[in-house]
Image: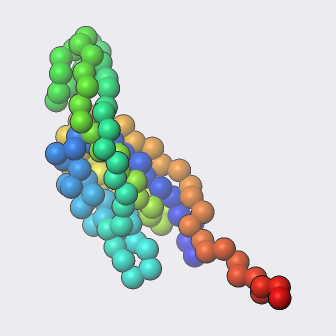
Amino acid sequence: MEPMDCLVIYVPTEAAHLVRQAIGDAGAGRLGNYSHCSFSLEGTGRFTPLPGANPRVGAVGSPEEVPETRIEAIYARSRRNAVVEAALSVHPYETPAYMTFPVDAGLPARTASAD
């Protein structure tokens, strides 16, 4: 099995479906005979745009709170650039918050049960 990574990205809730579709189309969320698998959690994003920012929401120097969705999906490590680029291409923020990291998605070794 190819090494797997996980993408976690925070997106305004109204745009979450676009990001899930884009990353799925790029290869994220492939599990066995399934595609576009992901997990989402609703929350509140907080940020303050600094001078030089061009915020989609809020104003420079003013703290902001926005309903956001945290999206998590695994993908084959070889698809990293495609998955991240797909997410960023549809994300509405000037500077999206995201992270990627390696995960162990392998099945545990099967052992014979002791009777």
Residue at (31% x, 31% y) in the render: 45
Looking at the picture, how far across and down is residue 64, in whole percent?
Answer: 25, 21
Looking at the picture, how far across and down is residue 85, in whole percent?
Answer: 32, 52
Along the line of sight, the residue nearer the viewer: 31 or 102? 31
Q: Is residue 63 left or right of residue 105?
A: left
Q: Residue furthest front?
A: 115
The image quadrant where one finds the C terminus is bottom right
Residue 57 in view:
yes
Residue at (40% x, 54% y) in the render: 72
Residue at (70% x, 78% y) in the render: 109
Q: In this view, does 105 lie to the left or right of 29?
A: right
Q: In this view, does 43 lie above or below 108?
A: above
The image's colour scheme reads rainbow
Looking at the picture, how far across and down is residue 52, in whole percent?
Answer: 25, 16
Residue at (36% x, 67% y) in the render: 37
Residue 89 in view:
no
Q: Is residue 2 left or right of residue 80?
A: right
Q: In this view, does 19 lie above or below 54?
A: below
Along the line of sight, the residue nearer the viewer: 39 or 18? 39
The image quadrant where one finds the N terminus is bottom right
How many marks are shown on the rendered structure? 0
